[in-house]
Image: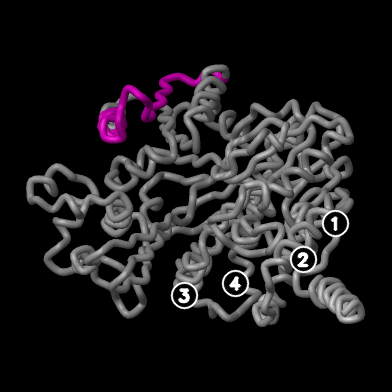
Amino acid sequence: MEKLNALKVHAIPNLDAKTIHFLEQPVGSGKTGLIISKISSEPLHSRMFVTPTIQLGKEVRQRLKEANVENIEFLYCDQDSTNESVRKRVKNSIIKHEFGERHVLILTTISFLNLLEEISPNHAGHYNLYLDEGIDAIKHEQFKAEHMEQFTELLSQTIHDAIKPAHGFNDLLNDVAKRPDRITKLGKENLLTPKYVTIAKMVTSPLYDVRANISNKSISAIAILKPNNFRYFKSVTMIAAIWSQSILALIWEKKHDVKIKPLTHNYDLYDTHGKKGAGIEIYYCLHPDDKATGQNLSRDIITGDVTNKFLINQTILHSIAENVDEFFSRRGLKYCWNANKNFRNPNRVLSGERMPARPSGLNEWKDIDNVAALVCLNPPTWVKNILLSFLDIDANDELESETIYRRWRLAHTYQTIGRCSLRDRNCKNGNVVVVLSKECAEDISKYFVGSKIVGRIGKLPSLKKMAQVARCDNKIKYEPSDNKAWYWWKKRNPNHEDTKQEWYQNKRRYNKVQSNRQIEHVG
């Protein structure tokens, strides 16, 4: 095991002169193992260990047992239980151990958030809290319906767009969020629309700042996690790679005056970035001009249009998938990959092993050296705009605005590539990493010292250029024969980067003029 000169732990002074620690080390460096060793060596303290998935929770439980840690409970929601039953079991366990022997309570993130809403400061104060892979900063929901006034009247909005229950409707909104049977008895079942229930849960929760755009046609709301409720615990440690670049770090530091202070400790952790970097080749898929956005990935490869009515095998993402599989197959390389859930991988165009869109903490692919991170979980533009307003950032400031999206992209891309053999310190093989954009490649390369950005896979057209000429393009009166000719020309010339307008101006128009002249000459 390699020894780092220093381990960066970000300490955040909290409201009650307490500290939140952030253990920020590379993927595969041994962060979780370090915490397990710490728990094992300090048996007189009760711990709460939070994981994003049931599978990771089971792995943590097993590793704690192997470290001879006693009194371990893992409580989670499965097919034989509900969130409410798990909540009661968690509360009973906490009460049981309040004055008795110390224990380790493992929870999934969902169960923990349910508990965090109602845990008393006294009970929380018995626990050192660990959150493996951190925790999401933002939830969002958008709701539209006829007769919106019956929904909006339950909400009150301040001049800063903060949302709370309207005067006199607090109990009713709480019932919408948590007691649907009461709403049914009142004959107001229309309020139980799933998306509106989600908004009601956001607004009535003490864990979030809620901001929204409300009109007579829709409610667009985001819930932003606050640091306040974490102050009750004896100590808090978030275990996450590159946490300082997360959206949560940005929000807590900028909006809640949370100060991040690096502390130095001599721990034995593996420097994945330094030891693995030189063996990493990085490729990207989109044209260098283009960003990795859901909108760009859903564009039609022929027309560049953004539409939900595209043929699945004509999208930019499908073309990327074809290029990626051809690239790995040509080199005879086994690979794993992930993409958004709505990409169904038609006809198994990607033949590698698929990972979840959010694979944080999973280890099933550590025997595979190569990975394609094709996931793009950036939120809609309206979410970004509300967040920018919350952070007092001018939406017209392109640099600051792009920084928000860049943090989202980096977090998901980094976690994806960290699932392959990069996390296996005993593996000496090199790694081929494919990401969506040149920007993503540059961000990843900065972390892995000595890694090389080799270049682009395929020759997709510049979507930015296509968008820039769209207005001019709309002025051209294309005939049906022009559209058909453009379609087949792109099919025959898949590597050409001309836009439709450029093709029309430089090729089609010339051919049509020549054809007309020949007809006139014959006449």
For label 1, the residue is: 493
In the rendered structure, which disc, 4 or 1, sits on the residue that comes first in sequence?
A: 4
The magenta span reads: 67-93
In the rendered structure, which disc, 2 or 4, sits on the residue that comes first in sequence?
A: 4
For label 4, the residue is: 401
Please tell me which residue lies in front, 445 or 356.
Answer: 356
Q: Is residue 299 magenta?
A: no
User: Identity of the amino acid at label 2?
Assistant: Ser
The quarter in which the C terminus is drawn is bottom right
Residues at marks 1 and 2 touching, judged by CB atoms closer than 8 Å: no
For label 3, the residue is: 389
Residues at marks 3 and 1 touching, judged by CB atoms closer than 8 Å: no
Classify 143 as above or below 267. Answer: below
| Of marks 2 and 3, the one in the foreground | 2
User: Identity of the amino acid at label 3?
Assistant: Ser
User: Identity of the amino acid at label 4?
Assistant: Ser
Q: Position of residue 182 (x, y in %)?
A: 11, 46
Disc 1, SS: loop
Image point (26%, 30%), residue name: 85
